[in-house]
Each structure stands twice: as C-alpha cells, then as structure tokens.
Image (tube, rainbow, N blue to C red):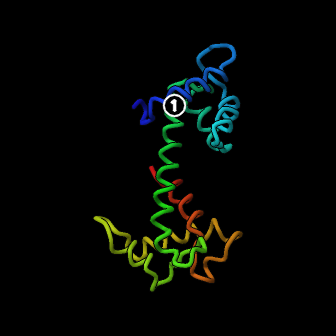
Amino acid sequence: MEFGLTEEQVRVYTEAFNDMDKNHSGVLQPTELGVLMRSRGHTLSDEDMRDLAADRHGTVTLADFLQIMAKREQDVVLQQKLAQAFAVFDKDGSGFISVNAESDFRKQMTSLGSNPFTDEQFDNFLSEYRAEAASQHPAEQDGLVDYQEFIKLMLRKAP
C-alpha cells in the first residue's frame, strides 16, 4: 500500500490525475487540483489552496495528490469511527450529545485512556466548539453538541 492507499485507490487516483493533466507536465495547478478533488467527492478550502500554492511552488505532483488523498481517506475512516463512538452517547438518536457536568460523555473524556482530559482541558476544547457553532446551535444554553460538527472540529485539530 503506497501512501496508505490500496492498489485500487492508487490506480483510480493516478488515472484521475493523469486525465486532469492535459498537457502531460506531471503537475497540476491549484485550481486544477480543486476541480480534481471535487470530482473525487472532496473539497479544498481557500486556505487549503493557499497552503498548497505556498508549500509546493504553485503546483501539485502526482505524489502530492496521492498524499493528499491518503490523508482525506484516513480522515473519512476516522470520521466514521468517531461517529460510531459518539453514537453510543446519543441515546435518543437526535445527533446531539450532552456535555454537561453529569454527562457520560464528559465522564469518559475525563477519565479514560492513558492521557484523559482534565475538566479544564475538556471545557477549553468545548469552548472552541461553542465559538464555532454559536450561530448554528446554542450549545452553551442546552449543554448539547452536534457530534458531527464536533467531529469536524476534532479532525481539524488532529496533527
């Protein structure tokens, strides 16, 4: 497995890259990469595009693209695993979990694992979610978080 991708994924992504590389230069411009990513069901933010332009001298090679796609595939798998884990705390299937002081979720996050959150660390992390989600959901008032949005924040924070 190259780049953490299956042989089939490497083949599909290589073909897609080569199809987009109309002049056979072996590189794509960031705008071409954006089109290619959307065709594969992924999007690149403006920030991603700036980072790519800065990091790769304005072009993206096949190896760069495979590395990007490997990261995206890993994110999808991680997002699915996190959603399954969070679903355990979503007793009523609403898409929201409680994060108040008595919640099972808070208790698990501050006690399990080799390096659990302290209450303060957990509250700091939640404050980031609350700041981002304030316009979409009043997490501060009801003590609930939309765990799909929470997962997105966690993935952005991951190294």
Check disc 1: other Cα within 10 Å, few if <14, some if 14-19, many if 20+. Answer: many
**Image quadrant in which you'd find residue 62:** top right
Identified by mark 1, the residue type is: Leu
| Residue 73 appears left or right of 49 | left
Q: Picture coordinates of residue 94 (x, y %)?
A: 60, 74
**Residue labelled with disc 1:** 66
| Residue 31 appears left or right of 80 | right
The residue furthest left is 114
Locate the N terminus and report the quarter of the image it occupies: top left
Establish if 137 lies above or below 141.
above
Q: Residue at x 39, y 78 (%)?
A: 107
Establish if 23 lies above or below 139.
above
Q: Picture coordinates of residue 98 (x, y %)?
A: 53, 79
The residue furthest top is 24
Count of number-bearing discs: 1
Instruction: Give the camera-side residue of 72 and 158.
Output: 72
Establish if 132 lies above or below 50.
below
**Image quadrant in which you'd find residue 15:** top right
Q: Residue at x 61, y 79 (%)?
A: 140
The residue furthest bottom is 102
Q: Picture coordinates of residue 157 (x, y %)?
A: 50, 55
User: Secondary structure beneath disc 1?
Assistant: helix
Q: Residue at x 44, y 75 (%)?
A: 105
**Image quadrant in which you'd find residue 6:** top left
Q: Residue at x 46, y 71 (%)?
A: 88
Instruction: Give the camera-side residue of 53 and 6.
Output: 6
Establish if 139 lies above or below 159.
below
